[in-house]
Image: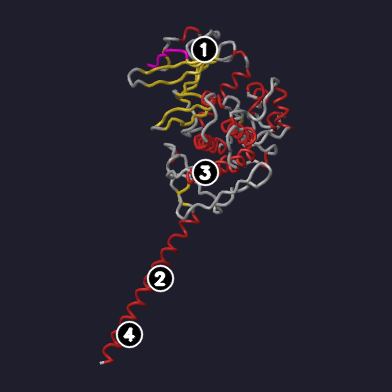
């Protein structure tokens, strides 16, 4: 067993055959990320290497191992893929992952407040990815704009890739080591749920809260709670009500969108969306509303690859109200009735409209047929009277 060496000399090194490390992409306190290329097929992959000094910590090594284990369980197109986990010839721990060329959601937010339709497209992809993660019992626990990459895929410039499952919690494994303290240390206070801020036991709804904070930031340009003190921010998450987005933003925010954000950020997990699919459906309703307002086609917000994720759940049967969003001081999420046959989501007709159309057409044809028969009867009577009068 070789002693841990610093990873300064990895440029030019070869890994698992013909992959050559070509350059460093970035570096943090625990490790660095490199780009490796296979020249024959011209494939790039990312190599995440743990610093030798960081690997002396059992907790950090466990976090690194957990990230490899967790990502290998996931196959969703909006989650970064891991290919190989192992050690370099210098005995450095590494993860070989999918290389994604793009920018972080953090970089995108620096450009200003997002268009609402773009924000919905991004958050729906996040919800879709988390639906798979949560179904497998994996809670991310560190969702923030830095861990959401936006890349180009089949013409879509805002294709989402979620990364960094290093402090993820696997809820369905009783022997899983608890890294709650690591979650507090490595997490960003601005995006932590009240229960995570209090080091309570967590489930998938902590991720829903974090998504709500990010959506708040996308729509207003600011996070709900700010302070120079991390402890103060965590305290505000626990005890303070956030200012409604409509009062924080420099432009109007629809009551529906405000209701979605406030529901996702409810202090009590029982008052939030109970799973990612519920939030996805609520966003789909608002998306349909915007497409109707802007006179855009039903596929205007289509995301390539979404047909592979299974996220085609029908919208609620009552188009007038998003389930679980009750009008109140911060929300009036009533959605107007769409015109008959209006498309919603990714090319789906609202069930109430598709059911009504055949019946309406049948009644129309019956009325025409009756009118024709009546005219024919009048003509026959007129002819009969004409001949009888002679």
Residue 155, given in percent of the width and then of the height, sits at: 39, 32
**Count of number-bearing discs:** 4
Question: Between tags 3 and 4, which lies in front?
Answer: 4
The residue singled out by tag 3 in the image is 284
> Image point 47% across, 7% down: which residue?
9
The residue beneath circle 4 is 381
Q: Mark 1 touching mark 3, by CB under 8 A? A: no
> Which of the two discs, 3 and 4, labels the residue nearer the N terminus?
3
Q: Is residue 17 visible?
A: no
Q: Nearer the viewer, mark 4 or mark 1?
A: 4
Instruction: Please say if 41 is above or below 73.
Output: above
**Left or right: 19 in relation to 171:** left
Q: Nearer the viewer, mark 2 or mark 4?
A: 4
Q: Quadrant of the C terminus?
A: bottom left
Q: Residues within 10 Å of mark 2 (few under 14, many from 20)?
A: few
* Label 3 crowd (10 A; few <14 / some 14-19 / many >=20): many
Q: Report the disc number at residue 91.
A: 1
| Local secondary structure at mark 1 | loop
2 or 4: tag closer to the N-terminus:
2
Left or right: residue 117 versus residue 39 is right
Residue ID at (50%, 37%): 117
Q: CA distance from mark 1 to mark 2?
A: 83 Å
Residue 269 circle label: none
CA gap between label 1 and label 3 equals 48 Å
Q: Which residue is mark 2?
A: 367
Residues at marks 4 and 1, CA–CA distance in whole angstroms = 103 Å
Q: Which residues are magenta?
A: 18-24
Q: Mark 4: give few (<14), some (14-19) or many (20+) Cα within 10 Å.
A: few
Say whether marks 3 and 4 touch (CB < 8 Å).
no
């Amino acid at each position: 067993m070789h002693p841990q060496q610093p990873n300064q000399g990895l440029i030019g090194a070869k890994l698992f055959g013909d992959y050559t490390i070509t350059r460093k992409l970035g570096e943090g306190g625990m490790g660095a990320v490199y780009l490796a290329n296979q020249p024959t097929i011209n494939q790039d992959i990312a190599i995440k290497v743990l610093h030798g000094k960081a690997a002396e910590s059992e907790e950090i090594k466990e976090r690194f191992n957990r990230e490899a284990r967790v990502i290998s369980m996931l196959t969703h197109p909006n989650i970064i893929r891991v290919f190989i986990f192992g050690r370099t010839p210098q005995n450095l721990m590494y993860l070989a992952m999918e290389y994604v060329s793009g920018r972080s959601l953090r970089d995108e937010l620096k450009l200003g407040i997002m268009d609402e339709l773009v924000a919905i497209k991004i958050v729906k992809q996040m919800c879709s990815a988390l639906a798979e993660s949560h179904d497998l019992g994996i809670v991310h626990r560190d969702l923030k704009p830095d861990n959401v990459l936006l890349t180009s895929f089949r013409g879509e410039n805002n294709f989402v890739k979620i990364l960094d499952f290093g402090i993820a919690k696997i809820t369905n494994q009783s022997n899983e080591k608890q890294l709650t303290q690591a979650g507090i240390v490595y997490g960003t206070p601005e995006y932590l749920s009240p229960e995570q801020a209090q080091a309570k036991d967590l489930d998938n709804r902590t991720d829903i809260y974090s998504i709500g904070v990010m959506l708040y930031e996308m729509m207003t340009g600011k996070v709900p709670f700010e302070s120079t003190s991390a402890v103060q921010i965590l305290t505000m998450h626990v005890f303070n009500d956030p200012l409604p987005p409509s009062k924080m933003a420099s432009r109007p925010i629809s009551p529906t969108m405000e209701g979605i954000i406030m529901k996702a950020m409810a202090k009590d997990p029982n008052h939030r969306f109970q799973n990612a699919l519920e939030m996805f459906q609520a966003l789909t309703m608002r998306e349909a509303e915007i497409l109707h307002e802007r006179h855009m086609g039903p596929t205007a917000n289509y995301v390539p690859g979404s047909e592979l994720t299974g996220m085609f759940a029908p919208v609620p049967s009552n188009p007038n109200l998003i389930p679980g969003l009750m009008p109140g001081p911060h929300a009036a999420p009533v959605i107007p009735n769409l015109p008959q046959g209006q498309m919603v989501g990714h090319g789906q007709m609202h069930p109430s409209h598709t059911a009504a159309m055949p019946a309406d057409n049948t009644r129309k044809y019956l009325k025409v047929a009756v009118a024709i028969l009546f005219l024919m009867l009048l003509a026959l009577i007129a002819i009969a009277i004409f001949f009888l009068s002679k």
